Amino acid sequence: MKEADDTGGLVPALLMIAAMAIIGVIDNFIVRLAEEIGLWQFHATRALLALPMVAGLSLLGLGRIRPARLWAVTLRSLLVAVAMLFYFAALALIPVAQAMAGLFTSPIFIVLITVLAGRQRIGPWRVLAVAVGFAGILLVLQPDPRKFEIATLIPVAGGFFYALGAIATNTLCARESTVSLLMGMMLALGLFGLLGLAGIAVLGPESAPGPEGFVTRGWVWPMWQAAPWVMVQAAGSVVAVFMMTKGYQLGEPSYVGVFEYSLMIFGPLFAWVALGQGVGPWQVLGITLIALAGGIIAVRSK
């Protein structure tokens, strides 16, 4: 039986907002990592650090590691891992606000998939919230047909796979331990990292210096300058993803997913305060619309 949420959606919403606040801080430093190491080394080394932390959560009594249905956890882990590969690649190639906005097309994809599947009814306020949030995303992304760049679509692809992962979390993995799901995702990302490193070692593609070479860069050693940021990512992601997963287990995906829009507040705000990475007036309006979308869902979701 699915875990019950007796607070009318408040607990999953708060869990998601807290998770987004953490991610909004730690993901701003991916561009620093991208100057030193590659995408695949990042995921392999982060998984190596994160897996003992996840095991520690199990020892603290927060959930068992062994999944009830291995196939369901495996499918969900692969979907989320693919989404994260697209997202982290985008963080190194385009501005943080644009990468986050692209990823958080996921609530729109969740609603579209839910409606097309024909198994759940979506209330008018939720439809309005998604429309408002999508308008905000367009303002943040500021797509220009005359200067189209394929990199803009990378986080959107991540958003699609993330939506599939969120639906799988709620429909296939509601009975699973949150720790089991977190372990599965970290294992999948670590495996992808090792496969990517092996592929680069065999094929030997040229790698550009700096963030531009993030996706095609192989193993780099020593990595002392990047190591502290990998550690921060490992610890922060374990806590944040635990809360995100629990939120999706407790709440209905098209409801909980909208609160991920709050990342579009925390991420750009931290980038502005700590890193001096500003946003334009249209992007500020877009972020406001995204926040409004979350507010509509919180107050009037039916």
Image (spheres, rainbow, N blue to C red):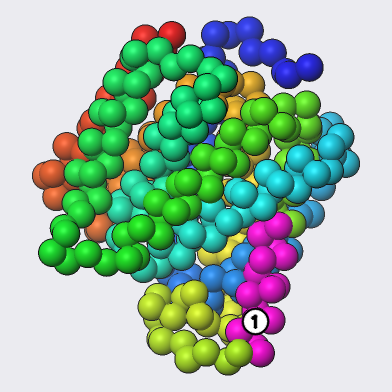
Given residues 277 and 47, the one toward you in this image is: 47
Q: Quadrant of the N terminus?
A: top right
For the residue pair 294 and 107, the one nearer the viewer reads as 107
Residue beneath label 1, please? 199
Q: Residue at x 14, y 50 (%)?
A: 280
Residue ID at (74%, 57%): 187
Provide residue 250's location: percent of width, then percent of height: 64, 21
Q: Is residue 282 above or below residue 92?
A: above
What residue range appears in magenta? Answer: 188-202
Give left or right: position of 212 versus 244.
left
Picture coordinates of residue 9, whole percent (x, y): 53, 14
Residue 217 x, y percent position in the rendering: 52, 82
Image coordinates of residue 113 in percent, x first then y, are 49, 33
Vertical side of 250 occupied by 218: above or below: below
Q: Is residue 38 visible?
A: yes
The amino acid type found where label 1 is placed reads Gly
Classify 10 Å Cα crowding around label 1: few (below 14), some (14-19), many (20 and above). some
Residue 201 falls left or right of residue 213: right
Inspect the magenta stretch and tell me whether residue 193 lies in it.
yes
Q: Main secondary structure of the magenta part?
A: helix
Quarter-of-image position of residue 104:
top left
Residue 11 highlighted magenta (yes or no): no
Please report the residue visible at 34 percent of the width from the left and 41 percent of the height from the top. Answer: 264
Left or right side of 86 for 194: right
